[in-house]
Image (cartoon, rainbow, N blue to C red):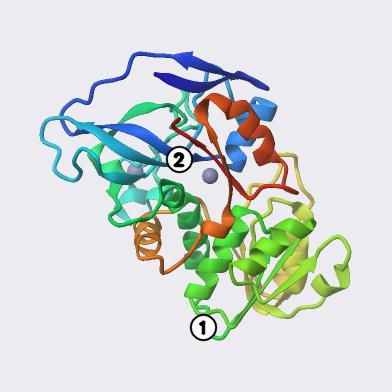
Amino acid sequence: MLAARIHAKEDLRLDAFDTPTPGPGEVLLKLGAGGICGSDLHYYFEGRNGNFIVREPLIPGHEASAVVEAVGPGVTRVKKGDKVAVSPSHACGRCEGCREGREQLCSNMKFLGSASLYPHVQGMFQEYFVMGERQCYPVAGDLSLGEIAFAEPFAVGLHAVNRGPDLIGKSVLITGAGTIGCVTVIAARLAGARRVTVSDILDRPLSKAREVGADATIRADRDADALAKPQFDVCYEVSGSFAALKSCVAAVKRGGVVVQVGTLPHEPLPFVVNEVMAKEIDLRGAFRWGIEFDWAVDYLSTRRVDVRPLLSGQYPLADAVTAFHVAADKNKSTKVQVVFA
Ligand SMILES: [Zn+2]
Ligand SMILES: [Zn+2]
């Protein structure tokens, strides 16, 4: 079997391994679709994701669907042939964060496809891999493997909205119209937002945001005035840009809430403390997700939400390098996936 491994900056190879065997409580999975995320792009194009540096070959990929190929002794949750969404979050279940029901704050987290720990926690851009059955969420019906692989990014959008206030009747701004911006649009509408506005610096992402339910869009680079006056109850900063965070702080009403979802560059940033203070803004962080992964699987399974407009391309795992380059071009792509082929 083949696995896509990042050896260093812009050095991704398809390396061959023996197909693993599932032990007790484990499941052998065949990759369905694996979404390429911003963090995967950072690992490939920079050899690092913020402070997490590739120090040994890293298999990226934390947004995946799969088909059950075989089950180990004692597995009851799935059977051979099931389509599954795979949760990449291995929280310990024992620390204070876990016991408070916030597994994303687990102090012993092993998150798949991440160089945050050494040895790295390998991800799912490989033809076959073994998971504990607890990580496998069976999905019945005709949902495609490509759609099932949206469970992870959609969970990020649901968690972002869950970290903010009740949205019924509220006007919302989302800065950034990539996959996470768009799934945050979907989540904000599920939560009852009255009006959802999205900003970005490219037209294609904004047209996708409208397709999935944004009421209005703003070109942040051309129409700075539209983001200068306080008019939104809640803002979600998804783009990972400090300029966008400043826009959120300027555009949120007095007493409003700003939720930081995107990862900003790691250089020291001048901060907008006085605005946060004088407007009594609640500034909150949203990191990954917890129970929202389960919700995402349910919303997708019933097609209560439709993420198909966000899937812009699929490439065989063997063409992972091409897939990474296409995924990086935001004029062409929203979500690009690698698939077993
Ligand atoms: Zn991701
Ligand atoms: Zn924990």
Residue 154 visible in the snapshot? yes
| Residue with the most extreme bottom position | 169
The picture quadrant where one finds residue 119 is: top left
User: How far across and down, in percent of the image, does residue 70 sit?
Assistant: 21, 31
Tag in front: 1 or 2: 2
In this view, the residue in front, 274 or 146, is 146
In this view, the residue in front, 153 or 211, is 211
Q: How many marks?
A: 2
Q: Is residue 289 above or below residue 206?
A: above
Locate residue 119 relative to residue 75 in the image: left or right. Answer: right
Q: Residues within 10 Å of mark 1 (few under 14, many from 20)?
A: some
Q: Is residue 66 above or below residue 288?
A: above
Residue 261 visible in the snapshot? no
User: How far across and down, in percent of the image, does residue 32 sit?
Assistant: 40, 39
Q: Quadrant of the C terminus?
A: top left
Which residue shows up at 65% across the image and 25% down it? 47
Q: Earlier in the sequence, mark 1 or mark 2?
A: 2
The amino acid marked with disc number 1 is: Ile
- Can you tell which mark lies on residue 168? 1
Q: Is residue 279 above or below residue 111?
A: below
Q: Secondary structure at mark 1?
A: loop
Which residue shows up at 62% across the image and 42% down it? 38
Which residue shows up at 13% across the image and 43% down it? 76
Q: Are marks 1 and 2 in contact (CB under 8 Å)?
A: no
User: How far across and down, in percent of the image, does residue 280 sit?
Assistant: 66, 74
Which residue shows up at 66% across the image and 77% down it? 215
Q: Secondary structure at mark 2?
A: strand
- Can you tell which mark lies on residue 33? 2
Locate residue 297 relative to residue 246 in the image: left or right. Answer: left
The amino acid marked with disc number 2 is: Ala
The picture quadrant where one finds residue 36 is: top right
